């Protein structure tokens, strides 16, 4: 069954868990395992690329949400990745879902790993995409895309797409979000400076995606992830910076869909 909504038209709904009123949107083909998106630093549901979300929605159900304290969701932003993941798990449980695929971008990629670690029975597959933070247009283009003419043109196309939704857009995040997320990132970085044992405990099939020229988290870090996760694949897109999925939305959807669909039926 296909819902009638798209990225632009899906209504914002709310569900309560852990004393938090989570804002979320669901759309796409309601079949198989839904794909839950975890957003980047200070990002909201409206910062996802509709070329990506609508692309996935043709074959599977897409679930976007704002974690605790973000935009239209209530509560406070936890100052640890573990706390963010715990809230995400509670949100998924409140939707009555027993099994999900999880996609994380930026800080959402760390949260996605922690979700898989805390609730291994809940997560079927992981998609981990880069890391980064929220910037004005000129910094979006500088950080998420390379300096080539083709990459910058792709960046300008993305900036137009993610503003397509006009009705019921998320409010911007408040001033408490960035400090809490930065504190959580600092704690997470210390954890991963010590050892890779945590990564070896994540046994779900995982797809790691990045640009070949990421200036936020150098592309070699994606290779390190792939080497230490027991069941991981790696894709590095050419002439692409931090926002590789924005630059190659159709190819990204195709690659991730192939990964998610393998052994699905």
Image (cartoon, rainbow, N blue to C red):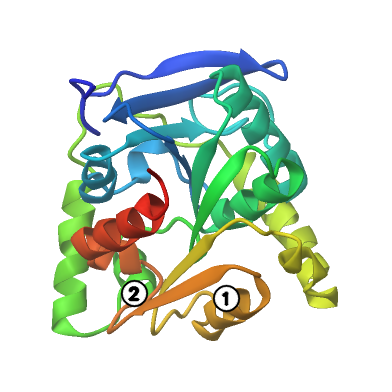
Q: Position of residue 47 (x, y in %)?
A: 36, 45
* Foreground of the two, 196 or 45: 196
**The disc label shown at residue 226, or none:** 1
Residue 100 appears at what percent x and percent y?
52, 37
Residue at x-position 48% and y-position 15%: 14
Image quadrant where one finds the C terminus: top left
The tally of labels here is: 2
Farthest right residue in view: 194
Which tag, 1 or 2, sits closer to the chain's start? 2
Residue in the image at 35% along x and 58% along y: 256
For mark 2, give the secondary structure: helix
Residue 34 position within the rendered picture, expressed as x and y whole percent measured from the top left: 42, 35
Going by the image, does 172 lie left or right of 95?
left
Picture disc at residue 142: 2
Question: Picture coordinates of residue 4 (x, y %)?
Answer: 18, 20
Q: Residue at x 26, y 84 (%)?
A: 147
Count neighbours of disc 2 (C-alpha within 10 A) and say few if under 14, some if 14 to 19, many if 20 or more.
Answer: some
Residue located 26% across and 38% down the image: 57
User: Gap between marks 1 and 2, in whole Å?
Assistant: 26 Å
Task: Name the foreground residue: 16 vs 1.
Answer: 1
Among the 4 quarters of the image, the one containing residue 15 = top right
Residue 95 visible to an observer of this rendering: yes
| Residue 78 visible to an observer of this rendering | no
Q: Is residue 22 above or below residue 183?
A: above
* Foreground residue among 193 and 254: 254
Classify mark 1: residues with Cα within 10 Å, few (<14), some (14-19) or many (20+). many
Q: Is residue 37 above or below residue 242?
A: above
Disc 1 element:
helix
Q: Which quadrant of the figure contains the N terminus? A: top left
**Marks 1 and 2: which is nearer the front?**
1
């Amino acid at each position: 069954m296909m819902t009638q909504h798209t990225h632009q038209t899906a209504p914002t709904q709310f569900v309560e868990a852990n004393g938090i009123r989570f804002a979320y949107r669901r759309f796409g083909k309601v079949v198989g395992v839904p794909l839950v998106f975890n957003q980047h630093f200070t990002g909201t549901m409206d910062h996802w690329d509709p070329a990506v979300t609508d692309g996935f929605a043709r074959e599977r159900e897409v679930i976007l949400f704002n974690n605790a304290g973000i935009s239209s969701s209530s509560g406070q932003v936890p100052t640890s990745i573990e706390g963010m993941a715990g809230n995400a798990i509670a949100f998924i449980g409140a939707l009555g879902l027993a099994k999900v695929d999880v996609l994380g971008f930026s800080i959402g990629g760390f949260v996605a790993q922690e979700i898989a670690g805390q609730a291994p029975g809940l997560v079927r597959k992981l998609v981990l995409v880069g890391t980064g933070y929220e910037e004005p247009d000129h910094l979006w283009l500088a950080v998420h895309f390379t300096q080539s003419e083709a990459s910058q043109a792709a960046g300008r196309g993305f900036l137009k797409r993610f503003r397509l939704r006009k009705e019921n857009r998320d409010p911007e995040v408040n001033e408490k979000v960035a400090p809490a997320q930065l504190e959580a990132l600092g704690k997470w970085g210390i954890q991963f400076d010590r050892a890779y044992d945590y990564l070896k405990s994540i046994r779900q099939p995982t797809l790691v995606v990045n640009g070949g020229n990421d200036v936020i988290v150098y592309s070699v870090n994606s290779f390190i992830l792939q080497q230490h996760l027991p069941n991981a694949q790696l894709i590095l897109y050419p002439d692409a910076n931090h926002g590789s999925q924005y630059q190659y939305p159709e190819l990204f959807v195709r690659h991730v869909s192939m990964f998610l669909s393998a052994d699905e039926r």
